[in-house]
Image: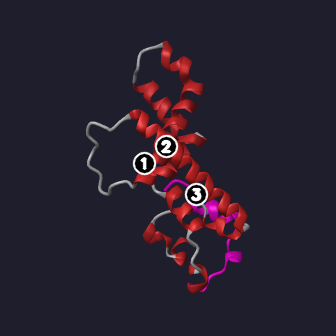
């Protein structure tokens, strides 16, 4: 399905099937991401400018940085709620690191952080905000998509 939409070239969407839901829901999603970015802007201001950032193959946009700031906080909160006693009760060893990493990977907040990191949240926001009839131009229709398309593309690859 992703290749038919030409998404393989541009990366992942959080929900290509979002195009099949009412426009109001898509607009609500886009507005919620914009609100998340405003919170992220405050978080980044509070954190201050980083001393040195690692060299990445591609530079993150300001939007993705703001989304990542919020998703980092959400992930840290979920780890703290679930594993605080374990983390504070003993030494840091390979088993603890593995347990925390597994929790982060399997947790809903970890999945959201991953989707932010690969640009899926930002790309989905852009699609929701900038619908320029590209589906019709590609000979596609929103009715072709279902929740199953989200499940197909939503798995970690």
Which stretch appears magenta? 138-157
Give the secondary structure at mark 1: helix
Residue 4 among those drawn in magenta:
no
Tell me if residue 124 can be seen: yes
Q: Which residue is mark 3?
A: 154
Q: Which residue is mark 2?
A: 40
Residue sitting at 55 percent across and 24 percent down?
83
Residue 56 as seen in the image, left or right of residue 93 = left
Front in this rendered view, residue 75 or 96:
75
Q: Which residue is mark 1?
A: 65
Marks 1 and 2, the one that precedes in the sequence? 2
Front in this rendered view, residue 89 or 38:
38
The image position of residue 50, as x and y in percent, is 31, 38
Q: Quadrant of residue 91?
A: top left
Marks 2 and 1: in contact by CB < 8 Å?
A: yes
User: Quadrant where the N terminus lies?
Assistant: bottom right
Q: CA distance from mark 1 to mark 2?
A: 8 Å
Q: Nearer the viewer, mark 2 or mark 3?
A: 2
Image: 50 above or below 5: above
Residue sitting at 57 percent across and 41 percent down?
109
The image position of residue 96, as x and y in percent, is 46, 25
Q: CA distance from mark 2 to mark 3?
A: 24 Å
Tell me if residue 13 can be seen: no
Q: Nearer the viewer, mark 1 or mark 3?
A: 1
Marks 2 and 3, the one that precedes in the sequence? 2
């Amino acid at each position: 399905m992703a290749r038919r939409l030409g998404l393989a070239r541009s990366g992942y969407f959080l929900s290509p099937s979002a195009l099949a839901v009412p426009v109001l829901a898509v607009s609500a999603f886009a507005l919620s991401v914009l609100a998340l970015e405003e919170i992220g802007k405050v978080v980044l201001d509070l954190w201050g400018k980083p001393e040195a950032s690692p060299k990445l193959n591609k530079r993150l946009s300001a939007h993705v940085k703001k989304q990542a700031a919020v998703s980092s906080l959400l992930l840290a909160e979920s780890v703290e709620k679930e594993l605080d006693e374990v983390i504070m009760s003993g030494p840091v060893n390979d088993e603890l690191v593995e347990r925390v990493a597994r929790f982060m990977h399997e947790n809903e907040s970890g999945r959201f952080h991953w989707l932010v990191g690969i640009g899926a949240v930002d790309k989905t926001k852009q699609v929701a905000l900038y619908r320029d009839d590209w589906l019709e131009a590609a000979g596609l229709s929103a009715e072709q998509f279902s929740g199953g398309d989200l499940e197909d593309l939503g798995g970690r690859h």
